[in-house]
Amino acid sequence: MRKILLGNEAVVRGALASGVDFVSGYPGCPSAEIGDEFGKIAKDYGIYVEWSTNEKVALEAAIGASFSGLRSLVNMKSFGLNVCSDSLFSLAYTGTKAPMVIFVGDDPSCHSSAQSEQDSRGYAYLSKIPVLDPSTPQECYDFTKLGFEISEKFNIPVILRAATRVAHQRAPVEFEILKKKRPKKGEFVKNPYQFCTMPPRVLEMKKELLEKLEKVKLFAEKHPTNYEFNRITNKKIGVIASGVSYLYVREAMEELKLDLPVLKLGFFYPLPERKIKDFIKPLKKVLIVEELDPYLEKEIKRISKDANLKVKIHGKDLLPEIGELDQQKLAYAISKILKLKIKSFENSLKIENWKLKIPTRFPRLCQGCPYWHIFSVVKRVAPEGTIFGGDIGCNMIAGLPPHNIQDYLFSMGASMGISHGVSKSSKQKVISIIGDGTFFHAGIPGLINVVYNKSNPLIVVLDNRITAMTGHQPNPGMGKTAIGEDVRELKIEDIAEACGVKYIKVLDPINIKELEGVIAEFLQKDEVSLIICRRICALLEKELKEENE
Amino acid sequence: MNNNVFNLIITGVGGQGIITLVSILDEACFLQGYDVRSSELHGLSQRGGSVITHIRFGKKVYSPIVSARRADLIIGLELSEGLRGASFAGKNTIFVVNNYYMPFEGNLPKEEILNKLNNLIGKNMHLVPASKICEEKLQKQVLSGIYLLGFVAYKKFIPIKPEFILKAIENIIPKKYRELNIKALNLVNL
């Protein structure tokens, strides 16, 4: 079958073709479509699918599945890898039983990422887990299958890392259509020798891991996913690229009518060092093309040095370390190395956005969004000098005009901890805003800390009955699972009460007067207080209405 | 067309149905036998902010994004966003812009945007009241993108045959909304 697929849809197809049984994850951009798609097809294909409370839990669920003999796929965005890293490193040591692929969506240029411009490839070095870096939806499909193959062969988890321009790229993909199957149950066969990382056994495990990696490296050396393009030339200048950067290299060479030799790396870790050495050996200059951090560049410089090669290695001296690449940045870098003059500025309007002076259109709350009421009331009622804590999700928009009520924004759930710290360290009043999904994800330990260590922020939970920003995924507070089954709703007020919060109020934020009154009242309290503004996301409400029509 | 690749940019505001539009165009290109690659954004940037999507098709396409100044056609679903697309324009780039203005805090007045568009682009500028037409004829402004797709296809501003766009709509759009989308596509012929 050949069809247009989004990169993320191709990952789903690849996992299906690899016989995946168990899918867990936490929605983020650019990865959420994977879990969404699996949610839709779970029943037909006999696959267990969940949105987990957070990425750490998602990974741990998959570890349980792997130890019980089920093939698993975990999906998350870049920052999810930070959240799950605690268990990720141990998993590398124990290894997998049934194969596991961990999909991570990176977002160079931070199109939909608030925290940092994270290059998740770096986790390869910390965790010692193989990392594959696809360029196209076709490779999303092929590399997912390859990931399962490597994981099964070497009993090691594999990270499939895709940048936004790959995960959200659409292109024709050749894939296998699979028969629907029945759900599978595995069996957990006790093996504490392999599944418990207690010392001193843990150091043996590290040794086993390093030995496995040597084998994976040999596999990578021979694997056609690291391939040379235009090898049969006597050119003295070459390019090494991986991920979406490879596409920009090819495009730039078409534009410049060049046929430089290119080494395309599908494996980011472990690197096929011999292949790289053989490629650069006859060259005078090599351009290393990768977005964000210069990991490949550093490795290849080391490989070259170890082999006493005289090749000059270029990379971040000609390409930016911040933001996405594109074919024009590549054309610039290549022409610098070749000392070419580019004539590409002909034929142009010679204008840039800054010359057009169009003001930025920031993201904004949707029409009818209940947050409109909340932000305006909070802003009006809060006394001069109030500190506003912000968190991840649609409520981030509090920091943008016309609201401008956000004094810090970090990672999922971080508002709780930072607000506590500010509250303890100053006499200032803190109003800390968090969404329902984020509250469940990482807000609860922070809330417990607020109570336990006695600070007094006013916490406002914006409960719009869904994880909205990433495309309306269900969460533990709204009574549905990832596959649409009914489940008991976890009430945020019950959790807050169990955490020891004394002053709790649940209200509908369209009752502006009530909201105003409660904020004013709670701001006087010496202890922590919490308001839950409960009203369904306006888009979701509209969708549900249309569905019922 | 550079190197036999057609470069299309669609700009608009998150929520205007741009991703559906990209899916339909990709499918139509595929059905017509082109190689095609597109790039879109989801999440934060989709929440009422500026959205720029790239579609490239032809004999063989590598990059999913269009180079600055290399667009053959820019479809703007909103006036300011149409103007924002201009950084992808060369002197032969065709602009098809919805005469529809979505204000936001600090934006330039509509007249100023229109002036800039006209002065900058001149004869290659096609201002189309797509939202108004869709509101009047179908009571659904959100179909303005599909209307503009019909506009560029029937006026031959894009080398995709309308029959493939129709087929693509059948393949992509859920049955419930299919008829309405086909109507919007064909409005330009009425």
Image (cartoon, coloured by chain):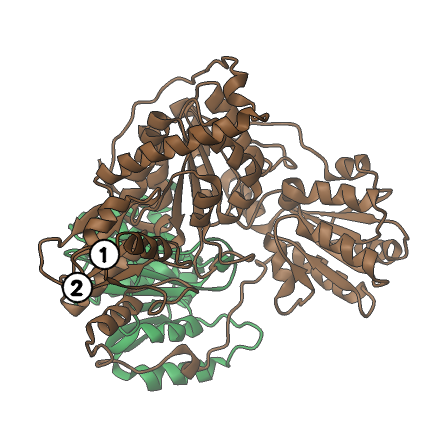
Chain colours: A brown, B green
User: In terms of secondary structure, where does tag 2 sit?
Assistant: helix
Is A202 on the left-hand or right-hand side of A96?
right
x, y percent for residue A81: 51, 43
x, y percent for residue A350: 31, 83
What amino acid type is highlighted by mark number 1? Tyr
Is A450 on the left-hand or right-hand side of B175?
right
Above/below status of B27 relative to A428: above
User: In terms of secondary structure, where does tag 1 sit?
Assistant: loop
The front one of A187 and A353 is: A187
**Location of the N terminus of chain A (image quadrant):** top left
Q: Residues within 10 Å of mark 2 (few under 14, many from 20)?
A: some
Q: Is residue A533 visible?
A: yes
Q: Label 2: chain?
A: A
Q: Residues within 10 Å of mark 1 (few under 14, many from 20)?
A: many
Cα distance, mark 1 to mark 2? 9 Å
- The image's mark for residue B124 is none
Q: Are marks 1 and 2 in contact (CB under 8 Å)?
A: yes
Above/below status of A258 relative to A159: below
Residue that appears at 33% across and 84% down? B120
- The image's mark for residue A254 is 2
Is A68 on the left-hand or right-hand side of B54?
right
Above/below status of B50 relative to A449: below
The front one of A211 and B65 is: A211
Q: Is residue B170 visible?
A: no
x, y percent for residue B38: 30, 55
Residue that appears at 50% across and 76% down? A359
The front one of A436 and A275 is: A275
What amino acid type is highlighted by mark number 2? Glu
- The image's mark for residue B62 is 1
